[in-house]
Image (cartoon, rainbow, N blue to C red):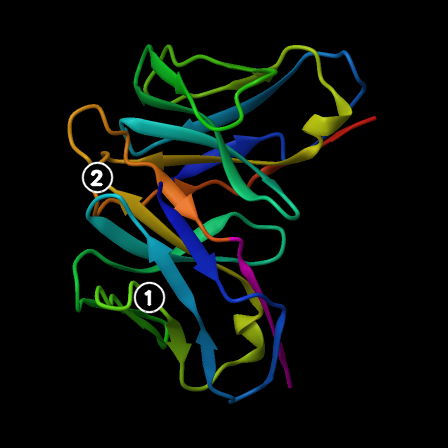
Amino acid sequence: DAGITQSPRYKITETGRQVTLMCHQTWSHSYMFWYRQDLGHGLRLIYYSAAADITDKGEVPDGYVVSRSKTENFPLTLESATRSQTSVYFCASSESSGGNQPQHFGDGTRLSIL
Amino acid sequence: GDSVTQMEGPVTLSEEAFLTINCTYTATGYPSLFWYVQYPGEGLQLLLKATKADDKGSNKGFEATYRKETTSFHLEKGSVQVSDSAVYFCALKVYAGGTSYGKLTFGQGTILTVHP
C-alpha cells in the first residue's frame, strides 16, 4: 500500500546503545522530516531532508544522525541513546516545501531507553 | 518567529454537542493553516487546510475558516461523536521561497474526549 511506514513500532533499549529508526515512503516525496513528540513540548523537529543526500538540522538535533541515500528512505540513528531520548518519534513527508502542501505522517515509533 | 497558540484542554463533551477549539497564530510570512488529528496510538492525519485568507477548510463535518484580520483558524463541528475523541493540532506553514523547507509549526495540541 502507498504511504509512509515506520519501523519498529515499539523499541526498548539501554542507555549507550545505538538504535536506528526506519522510515519509508512510497510517494516519491522530495521532503522528509523527523519529529519527536513529548508531553508538554508538542512536536519538535529533529532533522529534515529536501532530497536524497540533502539533510539539515531542525530544532533539537543533538544526539541524532540522519542519512538519505535514497529518496524513499530516511533513517534516524541515535548513536548513543540516553534516557532523555525516550519519546515517540514520527516521520513525515511532503511533496514540496510549498505553502499549500501538507506533511503526511507515519504511525510513529515508541522508543523507551532504560 | 512563527507560533501557534491553541486553547488548553482537555475538552470533554457529550455526544452531539457543539465543538470549538480555538487557534491563533503569528507568522512572519504568508501562512497556510492546517488542522491535524491524532487518534490513540496513531500518527497525525491531516484533517483540513486553508491556504489563503477567508478560505474555509472542511472535512468529516469539521470546519475552520482562515481569518487574517484576527489571525485565527478555529476548528468547529456542529455535532461531535464518540469517535471524534482524539488530540487535535493546529499548525501553520510559511513558504518563504528560496531555500525554505516549508517548516510546519504546531500548537501544543488539544485533547478532546466525547462521552456517549
Q: Mark 1 points at which residue?
A: B73
Figure check: B21 above or below A51: below
* Residue B95 lies in the magenta-colored region: no
Task: State the predominant SS element of the stretch in magenta.
Answer: strand
Q: In the image, is A112 to the left or to the right of A53?
A: right
Amino acid type of the residue that numbered disc 1 sits on in the rendered structure: Phe
Residue B95, numbered label: 2
Q: Would you say the residues marked 1 and 2 are in contact, meaning their CB atoms lie under 8 Å apart?
A: no
Residue B11, numbered label: none
Q: In the image, is A49 to the left or to the right of B98?
A: right
Please state the chain letter of the residue tagged with numbered disc 1 in the rendered image. Answer: B
Q: On the image, which quarter does residue A48 sit in?
A: top left
Which element type, helix, strand or loop, lies under badge 1? Answer: loop
Which element type, helix, strand or loop, lies under badge 2? Answer: loop
Q: On the image, which quarter does residue A25 sit in?
A: top left
Figure check: B49 above or below A17: below
Q: From the image, which quarter does the C terminus of chain B lie in?
A: bottom right
- Residue at the farthest bottom position: B16
Mark pair 1, 2: CA separation: 18 Å
Please state the chain letter of the residue tagged with numbered disc 2 in the rendered image. Answer: B
Asked if labels 1 and 2 share a chain, the reply is yes
Amino acid type of the residue that numbered disc 2 sits on in the rendered structure: Tyr
Q: Residue at x 70, y 11 (%)?
A: A80
Q: Which of pointers 1 and 2 lies earlier in the amino acid sequence?
A: 1
List x then y, in percent, for residue B89. Answer: 47, 57
Q: On the image, which quarter does residue A108 sit in?
A: top right
Question: Magenta segment range?
Answer: B108-116
Q: Which residue is drawn at 60% across and 67% down?
A: B9
Can I make out residue B1 in this image? yes
List x then y, in percent, for residue A31. Answer: 31, 28
Tell me if mark 1 has few (under 14), some (14-19) or many (20+) residues whose alpha carbon lies within 10 angstroms of its own.
many
Q: In the image, is B25 to the left or to the right of A90?
A: left
